[in-house]
Amino acid sequence: MHSANKRPGGAPPPPAKRRSGADDDDFDDMDLDGMLEDEEEMMADEEGPPEPLEDDAAGAAEADVPQSERWKRPDLPPLDPATDGLDFQQIDADYTVASMLPEFATPLCAGEQRAASVRFYGVTKGGNSVTAHVHGFLPYFFVRAWPGFKPEDCEPFRQKLNARLKSGKEPVLNPVVMVRPCQKKSIMNYSFGQQSVFLRIVTCLPSLVSTARRLLEQGMSLPSGGSHSFETYESNWAYVMRFMVDRDIQGMSWLSLTAGKWRARPWTSEGSGHVVKKATESSPYSHGTEPTLGSGRWRVRY
């Protein structure tokens, strides 16, 4: 017979429950006023705030300097474009269309008021910021020549395309500056290695490529009569991408501007008297010439 106070299995009985008001009574017995007084005495015994660390002192001194000055790169050292080169790593690139500078005008775009230039943003080994404007590169694309095409059809075809493009928004004298035949082959519709005649169409501004493409795909009259809807190739390439691919320039590569082929801003443009200004900026020009690939860590030279 088991005892009434024993749990099955011989386990001890649970502890007796405390009164619900026991914790409240203990909290009331605490001397809160005394604890606060002791804490105030401890704070009064301290001699003041701790001495700032050296890093904190340097940070406080730096905070007095304007943010624009703290993040400013060092100025480019004095360079003579006639005798000194300029090497920098390009970080970003875009292009701009601005007033044509006479010294950078290409023969194909003579008389035009505006021209495009590729801009490379980078930094030298010494930490100097550089923006380089490359002048003289013209955008282009290809179309497949029509049946019965002859090389002497290039100029009449260019004039017809020019007449259509002059009615657009761009105020240019010669929208299409060159049409030249070349032998190419397309990766579409495999032709067993046989090349076909294509026309390389060169425009004076990047924005004219898309306009010319639309007109040619819609159909144009031919010099020999009739009309033809053209297939266009490489007509959706970005202007900067086209330049970098043609010049074998890879992202984050180093560029070297050779002495005598660049000039530093500001300068007064020859003939127009226009003063070209912008801080820490250089303006190399290519005039359509091919660059020489550098060796070692330098990728491209102008």
Image: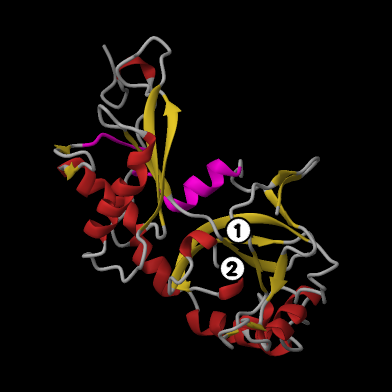
Would you say 80 lies left or right of 180 here? right
**Which quadrant of the rendered structure holds the N terminus?**
top left
Q: Of the residues shown, which amino acid type is indicated by label 1?
A: His
Give the image quarter of residue 129: bottom right
Helix or strand or loop: what does disc 2 sit on? helix
Q: Which mark is residue 245?
A: none
Task: Name above or below for residue 154 compared with residue 263.
Answer: above
Give the image quarter of residue 86: bottom right
* Disc with the residue nearer the chain's start (2 vs 1): 2
Q: Of the residues shown, which amino acid type is indicated by label 2?
A: Phe
Q: Using the image as rendered, state which of residue 221 and residue 294 is in the foreground.
A: 221
Task: Name above or below for residue 271 compared with residue 136.
Answer: below
Would you say 93 lies left or right of 204 here? right
Q: Using the image as rendered, state which of residue 253 and residue 191 is in the foreground.
A: 191
Would you say 171 lies left or right of 109 here? left
Residue 120, position in %: x, y? 59, 60
Q: Which mark is residue 104?
A: 2
Within-10-Å neighbours for mark 2: few <14, some 14–19, many 20+: some
Give the image quarter of residue 39: bottom right
Q: Using the image as rendered, state which of residue 36 and residue 166 is in the foreground.
A: 166
Task: Name above or below for residue 269 compared with residue 185.
Answer: below
**Which quadrant of the rendered structure holds the C terminus?**
bottom right
Within-10-Å neighbours for mark 1: few <14, some 14–19, many 20+: some
Give yes or no for contact between labels 2 and 1 (Cβ–Cβ under 8 Å): yes
Q: How is colour applied across the structure in the image? A: secondary structure
Q: CA distance from mark 2 to mark 1?
A: 7 Å
Magenta run includes residue 158: no
At 20% from the left edge and 49% from the top edge, which residue is drawn?
215
Residue 119, position in %: x, y? 55, 62
Mark 1 highlights which residue?
287
Would you say 110 lies left or right of 63 here? left
Question: What residue range appears in magenta?
Answer: 230-247
